[in-house]
Amino acid sequence: MTMDLAKDCYGFRCSDSSDFVNMDGCFVSKEILPFLNKLKDRLALDGFALRLESGYRPFDRQLSIWNRKASGELKLLDAQGNPMERPADEEQLMYAILTWSALPGASRHHLGSDLDVVDGNSCPEGYEVQLTPAECDGMFAPFHKNLSALMDAGEAFGFSRVFVPGRGKIQPEMWHIAHLPTSRKRLETFSLSKLRTIYEKTDIACKSALLDNLERLADDYIYPYFI
């Protein structure tokens, strides 16, 4: 990823490359780095190696994921994480993509404060992490249980999960954590009207369905996660 993409405009504020640092091959906000290192050291005491699978994503990267899922280049997964058929109807396809992928321009990964994490010590050599519920219930279960305990005890240095059962319509993602003190400040700049303008000018799949349903989508897939 070239950091010039960090200057792209999207629903949240625009970022500059000086905001970021590379960790595990992922870009994260420098603002969260001290807290992330503390969490990493704390987990290491219990035998876990916190590893980043994803960090900051510019608009173009999220747009690419969205469009490739719409075209069938990337597989669609149902709520249980199993491959599903690609719907022919545009609106149904839009909702199928939203099962596991955020709206471009409204993804929390645009903030630089949100991360997808796993336990590097539990990954078999050569294993390609999928970030699925099955992994969270399987090889990464002890890691997530330990991380949950730290969060519940207020010992996760400001990190918490955002995509949890009962909050909005996005499927729960145990692997996704956010540094809430940082993300809350950045969420204040979000503009739905700006996002609509971006969609109108962007070659995005399911454009008509997105524009026709944007306010409803915001109520179900964006605003519930502004915590």
Image (cartoon, rainbow, N blue to C red):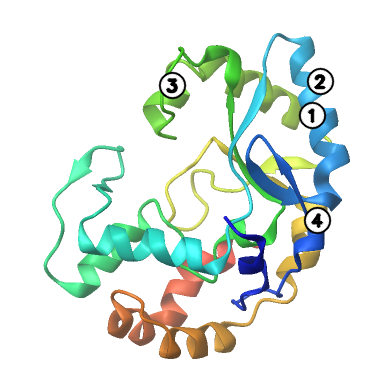
Q: What's the CA distance linking mark 2 and mark 4? A: 20 Å
Residue on which disc 1 sits:
39
Residue on which disc 3 sits:
137
Residue on which disc 2 sits:
42
Mark 1–mark 4 contact, CB under 8 Å? no
Residue 211 appears in which quarter of the rendering?
Answer: bottom left
Mark 3 lies on a secondary structure that is helix
Q: What's the CA distance linking mark 1 and mark 4? A: 15 Å
Q: Is residue 180 above or below residue 48?
A: below
Q: Is residue 181 above or below residue 157?
A: below
Asked if residue 200 lies left or right of residue 122, the reply is left
Residue on which disc 4 sits:
182
Mark 1 lies on a secondary structure that is helix
Residue that appears at 58% across and 87% down? 194
- For disc 3, the neighbor class at 10 Å (few under 14, some 14 to 19, many from 20) is few
Mark 4 lies on a secondary structure that is helix
Residue 119 x, y percent position in the rendering:
59, 21
Residue that appears at 81% across and 65% down? 185
